[in-house]
Each structure stands twice: as structure tokens, then as C-alpha cells.
Image (spheres, helix red, strand yellow):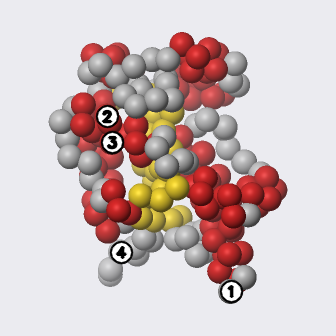
Amino acid sequence: MEEKKFGHIMVDIETMGNESSSAIVSIGAVEFNMATGETGKEFHVKVSLQSCLDNNLKINADTLMWWLKQSDEARTSLVDGEKLHISHALLQFSEYINECGGKTIEIWGNSARFDLGILSDAYSVVNIKTPWDFRNERCVRTLVSFLPEIKNMTKNHGIAHDALADCHFQIRYCSETYRRIKNLE
């Protein structure tokens, strides 16, 4: 039996900064069908902050203070559980992307430069080739800008600032936005 292909991957990362070369503490991803919102394989790893620092990825003081103001659940989701070295986390993420379609997959991040840009920077730092085609990068914020009321009306059922929960939330409002835009034709 042939495995179902969804065509898209939603990515969300949690970091200790908001600039290039920021330390990554969590990577989440979910493959999905944009037209239906149906989801498939999930990916979620926590990353050793020390391994990021050892590879010259950076912590931003403002972001660190921002994390201290987040919910107990959000902070706990970062510190509980096994943490992988940044290079191992990125290798596992590459394997996940290849299983979902590799260079042909459309990969979504919540801005033109944040999630996918910081991940690309991390791949470069640890000398691993980025597993997606830059031509297939897609921006959640751009899609949302066409009908922002949909995101505003969508409830987040997970822990805010948990990478995997954020992926599912973003898929719900992006898929609905896409369907509404397609119906406007």
C-alpha cells in the first residue's frame, strides 16, 4: 500500500533569540494537506541549549526575559524530557523531511525569515545541508495577511509556545484561510 503524501510541512521552532544564528531549543513539524487541513506524520525534538552555545548559536537577553514571562506549561515544555545535540536534532529533522517528500515538499514557517531562516543558519553552522528547497519555502504570515480575521477567530487548543502544538494551531487557521481564498474565485 502506497503511503499518503500531504505535500506540505508546517514548522515551528522555539528559540532563545529572534535573529540569525539564534539558539534553538525545540523543533516541531507536522505534515499536512493545505486544502483539507488533514495532518500526517509529526516531528518534535528538544535541543540541548549547551550544544547550540558550543556551536556559536546565540542567546538574546530580551528573548530570555520573554520566556520567563510565559506560562509555566510553556517553560516546562522546554526543559522536561530528553534533549538532543543540535546536530543530531537537525539530522533527525532532515530524515523526517525526506520521509515526507524531501525537496518537493512545501515547507511553511511563521514568517519569511524566522523559523526556516534560523533553521537554515543552524544547518550551516553544523555543516549539514539544508534538506528542503528554498524555492518551496512558504510564509504563514503572508497567507494570514489576506484574511487575518480567520486567525483571530481560531482557538489554540494546545500550549502556546510549544513547537508541536503551535504547528497544529497554524495548520488550522492556514488551511481555513486557504479554503476561503480558493472559494472567492
Q: Distance between the residues labelled 4 and 2?
A: 30 Å
What residue is drawn where x is 64% and y is 20%? 66
Label 1: which residue? 185
Badge 4 element: loop
Q: Distance between the residues labelled 3 and 2?
A: 5 Å
Q: Position of residue 39 (x, y in %)?
A: 53, 64
Q: How crowded is mark 2: few (under 14 residues within 10 Å), some or many (20 or more)?
A: many
Label 3: which residue? 120
Left or right of residue 132, residue 32 in this image: right
Q: Position of residue 53 (x, y in %)?
A: 33, 17
- The residue type indicated by label 2 comes to Ala
Say which of marks 4 and 2 sits in front: 2
Q: How far apart are marks 4 and 1 (CA)?
A: 32 Å
Q: Where is residue 96 in the image (x, y as percent from the top left)?
A: 33, 54
Badge 3 element: helix
Which badge, 1 or 3, is on the more N-terminal residue?
A: 3
Which badge, 4 or 1, is on the more N-terminal residue?
A: 4
Label 2: which residue? 122
> Is residue 120 in view from this perspective?
yes
> Are the residues flagged by discs 3 and 2 in contact, CB closer than 8 Å?
yes
Label disc, if present, on residue 48 of the rendered structure:
none
Label 4: which residue? 3
- The residue type indicated by label 1 comes to Glu
What residue is drawn where x is 61% and y is 53%? 141
What residue is drawn where x is 66% and y is 58%? 144
Which badge, 4 or 3, is on the more N-terminal residue?
A: 4
- The residue type indicated by label 4 comes to Glu
> Is residue 154 in view from this perspective?
no
Left or right of residue 141, residue 89 in this image: left
Left or right of residue 27, residue 1 in this image: left
Assign the N terminus to one quadrant of the image.
bottom left
Which badge, 2 or 1, is on the more N-terminal residue?
A: 2
